[in-house]
Image: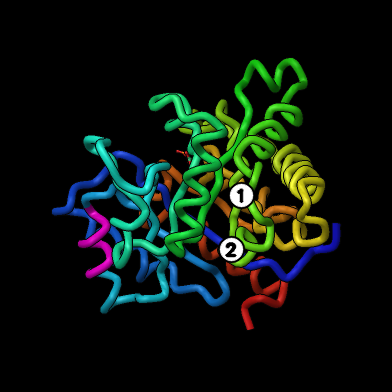
């Protein structure tokens, strides 16, 4: 596939780390160390730190997007402890949906993730949809089929034009690479990124599928980011553990800046 003019995106998923007392400083430090032309930066802190991170970045670096790590699939109602898309208004402009840790810990299904996508789009949030296979799937050579099933399940019934307009991003995150220090190879990730776009193209997206940014996630560090960004089909990274370390984020975003410059999206 031709290297498209897709944006280069680095999204930080802080998971269940940081407190409202330390999140602002960390966000400011990361923002200051990642001011690189052409790279879209997103920080996804825990829900309770969204407001402090928003306030910290509003003055220091409003270019950094703020994302939630999850959103409920219902509009409102008796769902103790949950957060709806409407509640995120003014706090976040991005949202991660279908992260494998939520599939694992909260039993999220593709159907539920599809509803979350709808809530995100209706609320004007830019969704990052996560897909990825288990190690047993890869060992059995089933990674394409698994990811295709996840995409079909989550995207079923959605209007491609609406998701396209919402700026849908897809993160390919093989579960066996998340938090393990064992990253996929750039080549394997690129093959999957192309498979993701092929699947989406077949779901009624057609050529629009070529515009979808596909990120790689799973043990990304400043030392291995180049391997992924050397692949034209990969448009950035969803970073977990390393996203809590300003040095790591500085290295990752600096390398992303080289890709942005080479693609001509940094102008
Ligand atoms: P990791 O997490 O970088 O710690 O592997 C990535 C993710 O879960 O998004």
Quarter occupied by residue 188: top right
The quadrant of the rendering that contains the C terminus is bottom right
Q: Position of residue 225 (x, y in %)?
A: 59, 50
On whether residue 50 falls in the magenta region, the answer is yes
Q: Residue furthest bottom?
A: 267
Residue under label 2: 167
Residue under label 1: 170
Quarter occupied by residue 161: bottom right
- The range drawn in magenta is 49-55
Classify 33 as above or below 163.
below
Q: Secondary structure at mark 2?
A: loop
- At x 82%, y 60%, the residue is 207
**Along the line of sight, which residue is nearer the eye, 10 or 83?**
83
Residue 137 in the figure: left or right of residue 77: right
- At x 52%, y 49%, the residue is 117
Q: Residue furthest front?
A: 77
Classify 182 as above or below 172.
above
């Amino acid at each position: 596939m031709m290297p498209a003019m897709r944006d280069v995106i680095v999204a930080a998923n802080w998971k269940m780390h940081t407190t409202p007392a330390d999140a602002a400083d960390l966000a400011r430090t990361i923002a200051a160390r990642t001011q690189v032309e052409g790279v879209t930066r997103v920080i996804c802190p825990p829900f309770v730190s969204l407001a402090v991170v928003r306030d910290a970045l509003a003055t220091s670096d409003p270019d950094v997007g703020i994302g939630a790590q999850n959103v409920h699939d219902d509009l409102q109602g008796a769902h103790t402890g949950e957060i709806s898309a409407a509640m995120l208004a003014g706090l976040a402009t991005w949202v991660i949906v279908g992260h494998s840790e939520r599939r694992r810990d909260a039993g999220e299904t593709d159907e539920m993730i599809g509803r979350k996508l709808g809530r995100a789009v209706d609320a004007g949030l830019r969704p990052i949809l996560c897909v990825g296979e288990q190690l047993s799937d890869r060992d059995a050579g089933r990674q394409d089929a698994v990811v295709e099933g996840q995409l079909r399940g989550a995207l079923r019934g959605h209007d491609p034009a609406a998701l396209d307009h919402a700026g849908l991003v897809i993160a390919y995150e093989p579960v066996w690479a998340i938090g393990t220090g064992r990253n996929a190879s750039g080549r394997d990730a690129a093959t999957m990124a192309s498979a993701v776009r092929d699947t989406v193209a077949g779901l009624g997206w057609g050529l629009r599928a070529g515009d979808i940014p596909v990120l790689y996630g799973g043990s990304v560090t400043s030392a291995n980011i180049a391997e992924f960004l050397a692949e034209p089909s990969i448009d950035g990274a969803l970073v977990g553990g390393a996203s809590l370390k300003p040095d790591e984020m500085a290295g990752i975003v600096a390398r992303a800046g080289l890709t942005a410059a080479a693609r001509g999206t940094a102008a």
